Amino acid sequence: MPLKKLVTSNDSAIGDIQETSFCRDALSRFIFNTLEEAQSAAPGGFDIIVVGAGMYGAYCATKIFNFTKNLPGYRPRILVLQEGPFLIHEHFQNLPRGLGSLYDIPLAPLLPDGQYKIINSDGTPEGQGVQFGRDFAGKFRPHHRCVGGKGLFWGGWTPSLTPADLAQWPAAVSDFLTSADGYSFVSQEIGADYDIDRNGKEKDFIYGTLYESLLKRSRVVVPFSLASDKYSIHECGTLWMGGEPENSVTDVNGRFHHVANAYCADQALFTMAGSANSVPTGLGLARKVARSIGKRFQAELPSADGDAGFLNLFNGSFAGMWRTAGNTNFQVFTRSTAHN
């Protein structure tokens, strides 16, 4: 039996919902909006636009919302733009096994052919001498293009970067990653908060005499030119962080040096790849970027509603500053109230 073509419901009480032979797509329809719908809901425009709702973009947008939701008065309007579709609402390992090729369905090229060129570290052209991923020699591996991105499929091994890795990073960044707000918090969020040796190596990471001996012997059998703590097979580092625009693309908060209101919040911020899986570090950096954006928004908010020199008499709370005369009460009107 051929699958039923997508149709649009005419039920105005619930809005336009597409249907297939098996599904009424209410979940994604009520969670997401078209660009026109989003714009009509915010006639005053948006304060923050996040491009891409993959693993890091969606996480960063969520953190910006969380870090600013309790600000007094006006809170930022956040728009998240996403190209790929909504697929599933939680990690695919939480769903029943045997649901077909969920892993493969949203895979798409990271970049279109012809828009990039890979040259190996030994100078050989793309497709030759590739040490890892020979099935994709000379190409980037396909990525999950859907809401949530690889966060829906990525496994749970979460080693943080070692002290040797972090020594190559700006001190402000490495200090954040090793603080309670960095790796520790992120590992709890993703359910991987196992015991961590605060000397920098997670106990789940492979170290020790046996490992070092096997590594040494394996190098004799399969020579590899890079030191074991200096390589990664993850795409990262094209917009690396740093303190000066002369030697970095973004600052230590992920903000572009030469663009006033643009930030990066993914693995492109890496100063160096390091020896560990890149996801925990990427999430930590996205969290740091969100913190910075939230603080900047809060710092610039007082002058947003008035001219230079305007004195704001209301700090978001009536306690200790204002009192009523007689049997009455105050009503707060904010810009968000006016927009609605």
Image: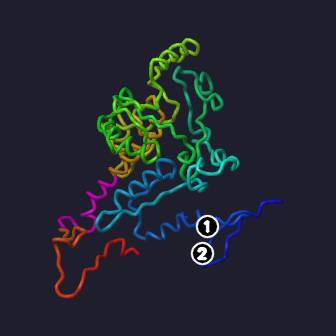
In this rendering, is residue 333 above or below 144? below
- The residue drawn where x is 38% and y is 55% is 64
Quarter of the image for residue 160 reads: top left
Q: Position of residue 280 (x, y in %)?
A: 44, 40
- The residue drawn where x is 44% and y is 35% is 237
249 or 231: nearer the viewer: 231
Amino acid type, mark 2: Ile
Q: Which residue is mark 2?
A: 14
Q: Which span of residues is magenta-colored?
A: 293-310
Quarter of the image for residue 297 reads: bottom left
- The residue drawn where x is 47% and y is 37% is 158
Residue that sits furthest to the bottom in the current view = 327
Question: Quadrant where the C terminus lies?
Answer: bottom left
Which SS class for mark 2?
loop
How far apart, in angstroms, are the residues tagged by discs 1 and 2?
A: 9 Å
Q: Position of residue 244 (x, y in %)?
A: 30, 37
Q: Is residue 283 left or right of residue 312?
A: right
Quarter of the image for residue 130 reads: top right
Mark 2 surroundings: few (<14), some (14-19) or many (≥20) residues within 10 A: few
Q: Which of the two discs, 1 and 2, labels the residue nearer the N terminus?
A: 2
Verify CB contact (< 8 Å) between mark 1 and mark 2.
yes
Amino acid type, mark 1: Ala
Res. 26 mark: 1
Res. 254 mark: none
Residue 102 colored magenta? no
Which SS class for mark 1?
helix
Q: Main secondary structure of the magenta part?
A: helix
